[in-house]
Amino acid sequence: MQRTSAKTDDERHLLALGKAIRARRKELGLSQEGLALRSGIDRSHMGRIERGERNLTVLNLIRLCSALSYKPSALMATADL
C-alpha cells in the first residue's frame, strides 16, 4: 500500500477543516464578512481558511469556534479530524 505524502495529508486536513467552518457559518446564516468581524480575522484570510489554503493557529481556531458557537473539538469531529 502506498502512503500519501505529508503535504497531501496536510492539504486534505486543511480542506476538511475549511469545509466544516463554511458549513457551520452557512448553518448560522453568516456571511464570510460577518464571521470575520465576529472572530476578528481579516475577511480575505477567512476566505483562504475556508478554501483550505491557510493553516490556522490555535488562537484563530478558538476565535472562529467562539464566533460560530461551536467547540473546537466538535468542529474537528465534523471535519473528521
Image (cartoon, rainbow, N blue to C red):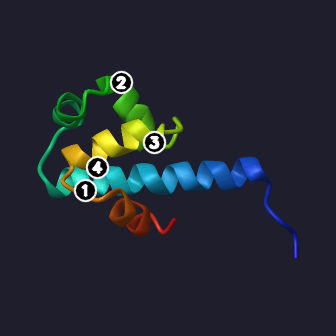
Instruction: State the image quarter where residue 12 is shown.
Output: bottom right
| Marks 1 and 3, the one that precedes in the sequence | 1
| Cα–Cα gap, marks 2 and 1 | 18 Å
Q: Amino acid at mark 1?
A: Arg
- Residue pictured at 48% horizontal, 37% vertical: 57
| Cα–Cα gap, marks 1 and 3 | 18 Å
Q: Amino acid at mark 3?
A: Val
SS at circle 2: helix
Q: Amino acid at mark 4?
A: Cys
Q: Give the labeled residue for mark 1.
A: 24
Q: Are marks 4 and 1 in contact (CB under 8 Å)?
A: no
In the rendered image, which quarter contains the N terminus? bottom right
Q: Give the labeled residue for mark 4.
A: 65
| Cα–Cα gap, marks 3 and 4 | 10 Å
Q: Is residue 64 left or right of residue 28?
A: right
Q: Give the labeled residue for mark 3.
A: 58
**Label 1 CA crowd tier, 10 Å (few <14, some 14–19, many 20+):** some
Q: Amino acid at mark 2?
A: Ser
- Residue 33 in the image: x percent, y percent? 20, 30
Check residue 55 in the rendering and tell me which mark sits there, or answer none. Answer: none
- Residue 30 in the image: x percent, y percent? 14, 44
**Label 4 CA crowd tier, 10 Å (few <14, some 14–19, many 20+):** some
| Marks 4 and 1, the one that precedes in the sequence | 1
- Residue pictured at 29% horizontal, 39% vertical: 63
- Residue 66 in the image: x percent, y percent? 23, 47
Q: How many marks?
A: 4
- Residue pictured at 36% horizontal, 60% vertical: 75
| Marks 3 and 4, the one that precedes in the sequence | 3
| Marks 2 and 4, the one that precedes in the sequence | 2
Residue 36, above or below 73: above
